Image: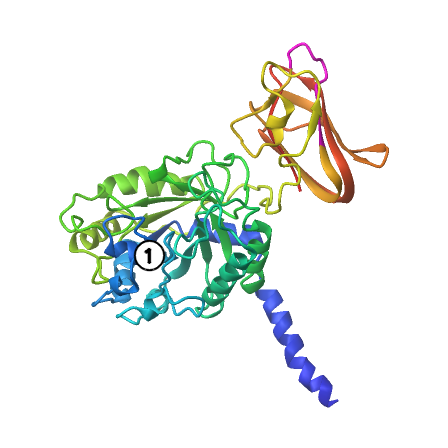
């Protein structure tokens, strides 16, 4: 009987946690319904002339003397924003929380301050949501191309554990510096499936957003719960065609981190921010986040505060947005087909079969026009358990029907055969099977058959 009374609270706790866990679709809708938030780039780059400072810049350089995060929160609220997102660690690796993983952090600076703690407390006090930004690329700790070691994954997980267990519920984690042409750290170097699963194990309701829209097609969620667009890097969301839960970000000032000219700089036009960004994006299932950079004292400049106040005069949160359309679940596993050997029917010119699994969505296997039923096949280099195949066309709608098969031993088995929807990215999810090869045979088409990328997971 005593053991029953001991176990009962534990069981009730587990049931309560399970009851509170939300579906991904609920979380995506809730995120889009937030409409408008504040990005806050603050850290070691604030004390440099560059957003990418010397990664060995001394800890003593970080010296805010008047840090009052309540000012940030009140400024966000004045603009009608509903949440904030703070850069806990940018690309040069300086941490602005009380971390035990490194001495390269704000607690070891002359300020001896946990900025993340002050930030989350201040924003929650104003009734605002809390999100965090975290960079995988870390040039100070040598988490960069050519230097990746197994212990780096342990290091990253230790830092994420601190952020996701010491500061309460985190609405979303925005990840940067991963699988980008400029960071050159792939999802294999630092395993995306491992990090994604680890984040969800710590906080199941925390959305994971990787800033990867530049590489992946806009029609599907690849390695992110929310499609993210960094407008300053040329990533522009289509307000007429977007059907995914999305985030678009842009700085109010000329750069992400504070620079000495900013107190007197002309900032982005307030009406343009509202009329050309917040309103049209909200109508396109997109949450807009505006960056405001605190200065070296740790406070926001007067001109930035005034711009936020004026935004709040002409824009007001109108409640939930319209429902986000149904969409496929995010792809979060490693693409087994990447760089595997292929066979295929006659291709056109240089568009050979390898282009369909080269992890590059700008290239494509292109069938020769004379082939009536083009086929493409990939050898998975051994037996693998698979449950998802994604197929992306170069041109929407040219492929009308196909047969999808997998090979086990000497026999081919059909996973799908028939007419396919007119969309560029087609996903097939099925009960797990053991496969050695996968083959696609196009049975009906018009125009050019071209596959930019086939993913097998």
Q: Residue at x 57, y 42 (%)?
A: 326
Question: Residue 188 or 118: which is nearer the viewer?
Answer: 188
* Percent position of residue 408, x then y: 82, 37
Q: Which residue is mark 1?
A: 56
- On whether residue 375 falls in the magenta region, the answer is yes
Decide whether residue 384 is among the magenta residues: no
- Residue that sits furthest to the right in the current view: 410
- Viewer-nearest residue: 29 or 44: 44
Left or right position of 210 against 124: right
Q: Which residues are magenta?
A: 368-378
Across and down, in percent, residue 16 comes to 60, 71
Q: Can see residue 331?
A: yes
Q: Is residue 231 above or below residue 131?
A: above
Against 277, is 442 above or below? above
In the structure shown, which secondary structural element does the residue marked by tag 1 occupy? Answer: loop
Magenta-colored segment: predominant secondary structure: loop
Instruction: Examine the image and state in which quarter residue 277 appears.
Output: top left
Q: Could you tell me residue 240's position as x and y percent?
A: 43, 31
């Amino acid at each position: 009987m005593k053991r029953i009374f001991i176990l009962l609270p534990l069981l009730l706790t587990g049931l309560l946690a399970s009851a509170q866990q939300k579906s991904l679709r609920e979380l995506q809708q809730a995120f889009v319904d937030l409409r408008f938030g504040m990005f806050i780039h603050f850290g070691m780059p604030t004390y440099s002339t560059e957003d990418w400072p010397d990664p060995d810049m001394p800890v003593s350089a970080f010296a805010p003397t008047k840090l009052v995060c309540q000012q940030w929160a009140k400024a966000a609220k004045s603009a009608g924003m509903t949440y904030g997102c703070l850069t806990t660690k940018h690309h040069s690796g300086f941490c602005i929380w009380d971390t035990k993983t490194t001495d390269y952090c704000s607690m070891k600076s002359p300020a001896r301050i946990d900025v993340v703690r002050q930030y989350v407390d201040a924003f929650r006090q104003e009734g605002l949501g809390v999100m965090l930004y975290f960079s995988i690329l870390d040039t100070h700790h040598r988490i960069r191309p050519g230097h990746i070691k197994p212990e780096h994954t342990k290091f990253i997980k230790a830092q994420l554990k601190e952020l996701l267990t010491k500061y309460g519920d985190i609405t979303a984690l925005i990840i940067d510096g991963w699988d980008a042409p400029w960071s050159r750290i792939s999802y294999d170097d630092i395993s995306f499936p491992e990090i994604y699963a680890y984040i969800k194990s710590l906080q199941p309701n925390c959305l994971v957003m990787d800033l990867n829209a530049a590489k992946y097609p806009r029609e599907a969620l690849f390695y992110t719960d929310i499609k993210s667009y960094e407008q300053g890097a040329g990533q522009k969301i289509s307000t007429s065609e977007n059907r995914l839960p999305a985030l678009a970000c842009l700085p109010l000032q000329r750069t992400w981190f504070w620079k000495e000219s900013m107190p007197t700089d002309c900032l982005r036009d307030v009406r343009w921010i509202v009329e050309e960004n917040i309103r049209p994006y909200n109508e396109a299932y997109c949450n807009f986040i505006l960056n405001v950079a605190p200065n070296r004292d740790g406070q926001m400049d007067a001109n930035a505060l005034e711009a936020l106040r004026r935004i709040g005069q002409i824009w007001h949160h109108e409640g939930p947005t319209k429902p986000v359309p149904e969409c496929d679940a995010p792809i979060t596993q490693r693409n087994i087909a990447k760089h595997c050997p292929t066979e295929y029917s006659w291709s056109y010119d240089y568009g050979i079969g390898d282009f369909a699994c080269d992890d590059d969505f700008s290239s494509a296997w292109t069938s020769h026009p004379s082939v009536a039923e083009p086929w493409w096949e990939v050898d998975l280099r051994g037996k693998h358990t698979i449950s998802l195949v994604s197929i992306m066309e170069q041109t929407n709608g040219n492929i009308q029907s196909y047969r999808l098969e997998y090979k086990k031993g000497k026999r081919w088995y059909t996973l799908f055969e028939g007419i396919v929807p007119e969309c560029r990215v087609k996903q097939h999810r099925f009960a797990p099977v053991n496969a050695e090869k996968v083959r696609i045979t196009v049975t009906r088409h018009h125009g050019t058959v071209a596959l930019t990328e086939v993913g097998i997971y």
